[in-house]
Amino acid sequence: MSILIKNVLLNQQVVDVYIKGNRFEMIAPNLDIEAEQVIDGTDKAITPSFANGHTHAAMTLLRGYAEDMELHTWLNNHIWPLEGKLTEEDVYVGSKLACLEMIKSGSTFFNDMYWHFSSTARAVEEMGIRAALSSVFIDFNDPDTADYRWKECLELFDQSRNLDPRIDFALGPHSIYAVSRDSLLKVGDFAEKHDLQIHIHLCETQKEVQDSLEQHNQTPVQYLHSLGLLGPNLCACHSIWLNHEDMDLLAENDVKVIYNPVSNLKLCSGNFPYQELKKRGIRIALGTDGCSSNNNLDILEEMKFAALTNKAHCQDPAIMPASEVYTASTHTAAKIFGLDCGEIAEGKLADCILINLNHPQVVPNYNLVSNLVYSANGGCVDTTICNGEILMQNREFPGEEEIISQARETARRLITTN
C-alpha cells in the first residue's frame, strides 16, 4: 500500500508526503513518484495523530449516565452496578463507537482498561487504530475473586500473542483500594517477567490517600513503592493528591503519569501538580478517561482544558504553553507507550492527521499548534491515517451510521433491562 499526500502544509512549508507500507518514506516538495492513493493536501496541514493515554473505551455506552456526583458514590452506586450488566457484545459495540469517535477527532492510539478484553481487541482490530489494552483487575481483597481474575489475566495474555501487532497487552489493576496486596505483588512480578506495562488509577482523590494512610500507614505511592511496583513500566493515571516525597519517588522510578483534566474537573478530584511533576522530569501524557466522566474522547478539547486549568490554578498565563501540551499528546505519549511515531518524519510510523485549514476555528493560521490547542476541536480533522491506512477521509468513515445505530440500541437496552 502506498499513499502520496500532495501540497500539504508541514511546519510552515508546503511539501509532498509519501507513505509506503506503514511508514513515512519520503517528505519533500514536488515529489515525482507513483502511489496507489493520492490525497490532495491543499489547504490542509499534516500533523501527528494523537494518543489518548487513559480510557475505558466501552463507557461510551454510559455517556450521560449518573452525572454530577463525587467519584466514589458515582463508581460504587451507579457505574459499577450498570457495568455488571455489560456483555461481551455490548463492550464490542461500545468500543467500536469509542474508536469511531477517536478516529474522527484525530486519535489513533488509546490506553484502555475495561471488562471483556477480547471484545475491545476485536473492535480495535476492525477499526484500524492502535491500543494498549488491559482487562480491569478488581478483587476487593476476596481470595476467590482474586484467583478467578488472575487466571483470566493469564488466559488473556496467552490469547494476546495472536492479536494484530497494533495491539499491546497491558496489566490493569484498577487501584490500590480495589486490588489486594497479594494481587498487586503478582502483577508486579508478572509485568517484570514479561516486560508489560501496568495501567493503574493512582492518587485520584483525597479519600484514596486518607484511606491508604489509615490502612497502610503510607500514601498510595509509598505503598506501591514498598511492593516494588514503581518503575518505568507503571502508567499512573490521575496522580493528583501527591506530596513531595511521592513526586520524588515517581521521578526516581521513571513512572509515567497520565493527566485527565476534564474528568478531574467534572468529579472535583483536585488540581493536577503539573509544574512540580515537570520540574522532576516526569513524563506526562493526556487522557480523556471514560465517556461517563468526561463525556467525550476528544484529545483536542483535553489539551485546552489541561492548559487553561493549570494557568488558572497557578495564576500564571505562561504555565503549560500550547507547545508543551501539544507535545504531551503526540511525541511524549508515543515515547511513553513505546510507539515509533508522534512526529512527521521519514522512517516513522505513518500515523497522522490532516487538519482542514479552511475550518473557521483555525482561521487565521498564525500558529497551528496554538490553534489546535486553544481553538480547534475534533471537527477540524479532515483525514485520519494509522499504520499507513486511510481510516477517515473528508470526515467520512465507512459504516459510521451502523456503528452509531448499534450503540444507541445497546445503550437503550442496558438502561431498560432489569
Image (spheres, helix red, strand yellow):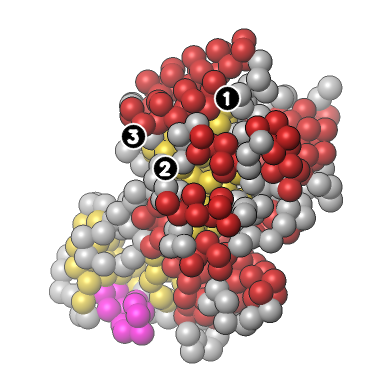
Bin the neighbour count of mark 2 within 10 Å (Cα to Cα): few under 14, some 14-19, many 20 and up.
many
* Residue 222 shown left or right of residue 196 in the figure: right
* Label located before the other in sequence (3 or 1): 1
> Which one is earlier in the sequence, the residue at label 2 or at label 3?
3
Residue that sits furthest to the top in the current view: 144
> In the rendered image of this protein, does residue 343 appear above or below residue 54?
below
What separation in Å lies between label 3 and label 1 (alpha carbons)? 21 Å
Q: Position of residue 325 (x, y in %)?
A: 51, 69
SS state under label 3: loop
Q: Main secondary structure of the magenta part?
A: strand
Magenta residues, start to end = 6-16
Instruction: Note whether 38 is above or below 11 in the view shown.
Output: above
* Number of the label disc, if any, that sits on residue 181: 1
Residue 11 is inside the magenta segment = yes
Q: Position of residue 326 (x, y in %)?
A: 48, 69
Circle 3 residues within 10 Å: few <14, some 14–19, many ≥20: few
Disc 1 residue type (three-letter): Arg
Disc 2 marks which amino acid? Gly
Query: In whole angstroms, how far apart are the C-alphas of marks 2 and 3?
Result: 11 Å
